[in-house]
Image: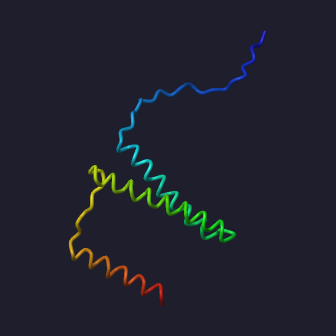
Amino acid sequence: MKIRVNTIKNPDTMVEAHIFNDKDILSNVISYEKENVSLYSIAMGEASNQTLYETLFEMYTETQNMQRALHNLMFKKGWYTIDIEEKDKLLDSHSQYSEYINKVKH
């Protein structure tokens, strides 16, 4: 007598349980918000009519504001830092960018 198996399954892989902390959760949420801002921007450019564009623009603005609020919250909690750059490095970056722009223009 042959037994038929209706389920095909690989053995379970044991994973270590991880509990997200507030920083992990906010980092994930802000990543999603950044992605959504980009997607709304694309959608607005491809909107087929003004009403759709305006609706997408409202959603874009709300999402952008939420992203900014999350950034401010994470900064307030010390989870984002701002590095103070030396003036010479800023000038070098500006010079490199200006050279690049001039090459693209010509």
The quarter of the picture where the N terminus appears is top right
Q: Position of residue 24 (x, y in %)?
A: 38, 43
Residue shown at 39% from the left, 53% from the top: 70
Q: Position of residue 7 (x, y in %)?
A: 69, 24
Residue shown at 23% from the left, 69% from the top: 85
Residue positioned most to the bottom: 106
Residue shown at 39% from the left, 56% from the top: 69
Against 74, residue 43 (above or below) is below
Residue positioned most to the right: 1
Q: Position of residue 15 (x, y in %)?
A: 45, 30
Residue shown at 26% from the left, 79% from the top: 91
Against 70, residue 54 (above or below) is below
Q: Position of residue 35 (x, y in %)?
A: 50, 57
Q: Is residue 33 left or right of residue 96?
A: right
Against 36, residue 2 (above or below) is above
Q: Is residue 12 left or right of residue 84?
A: right
Q: Quadrant of residue 6?
A: top right
Q: Is residue 31 left or right of residue 49?
A: left
Against 8, residue 4 (above or below) is above
Asked which colour scheme the image uses, the reply is rainbow
* Closer to us: 82 or 8: 82
| Badge count | 0
Residue positioned most to the top: 1
Q: Is residue 76 left or right of residue 42?
A: left
